[in-house]
């Protein structure tokens, strides 16, 4: 448990920072908010009667930590889709994010212009 507690402060700090970003950036550009409750669940497993108090604490911590990472990935993915819809360079072993499947292919200028220039008025 001490090792897990060591990460609690960085997780809370990143949670505050990403939420400030989310609440400021998304409305400015007309992007819909990501529903936090769809990604972070803390109390559900803690209600299981067959877990000890320590196991419930671990479950609450992991629910928060992993849910927060999932939530941050979704916010980052929506931001990337809105701001930079270009796939990464296809190199051996790289695993792209699921949200990037419809992005313009790396180096395909015509596809990028077709998909994004109207949106950004890029010539």
Image: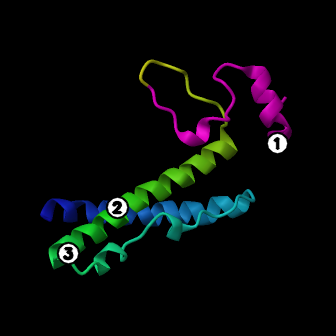
Above or below 73: residue 52: below
In the picture, which quadrant includes the N terminus? bottom left
56 displayed left or right of 88: left
28 displayed left or right of 106: right
Q: Which mark is residue 56?
A: none
Secondary structure under the numbered disc 1 in the rendered image: helix
> Residue 26 appears at what percent x and percent y?
66, 60
Q: Marks 1 and 3: which is nearer the front? A: 3
Q: Is residue 122 visible?
A: no
Residue beneath label 1, please?
A: 119
> Residue 34 appears at what percent x and percent y?
60, 62
In the picture, which quadrant includes the C terminus? top right
Q: Is residue 61 visible?
A: yes
Q: Which mark is residue 51?
A: 3
Residue beneath label 2, please?
A: 65
| Mark 3 surroundings: few (<14), some (14-19) or many (≥20) residues within 10 A | few
32 displayed left or right of 88: right
**Which image quadrant is residue 57 in?**
bottom left
Could you tell me which residue is drawn at 83 percent across and 30 percent down? 114
Q: CA distance from mark 3 to mark 2?
A: 19 Å
Q: Earlier in the sequence, mark 1 or mark 3?
A: 3
Q: Marks 1 and 2: which is nearer the front? A: 2
Could you tell me which residue is drawn at 79 percent across and 34 percent down? 115
**Which image quadrant is residue 116 in?**
top right
Q: Earlier in the sequence, mark 1 or mark 2?
A: 2
Q: CA distance from mark 1 to mark 3?
A: 52 Å
Q: Earlier in the sequence, mark 3 or mark 2?
A: 3
């Amino acid at each position: 448990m001490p090792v897990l507690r060591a990460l609690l402060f960085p997780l809370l700090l990143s949670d505050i920072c990403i939420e400030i970003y989310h609440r400021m950036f998304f409305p400015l550009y007309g992007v819909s908010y990501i529903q936090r409750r769809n990604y972070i669940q803390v109390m559900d497993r803690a209600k299981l009667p067959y877990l000890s108090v320590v196991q419930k604490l671990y479950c609450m911590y992991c629910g928060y930590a992993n849910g927060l990472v999932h939530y941050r990935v979704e916010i980052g993915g929506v931001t990337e889709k809105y701001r930079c819809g270009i796939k990464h360079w296809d190199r051996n072993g790289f695993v792209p994010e699921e949200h990037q499947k419809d992005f313009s292919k790396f180096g395909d200028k015509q596809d990028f212009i077709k998909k994004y220039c109207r949106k950004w008025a890029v010539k």
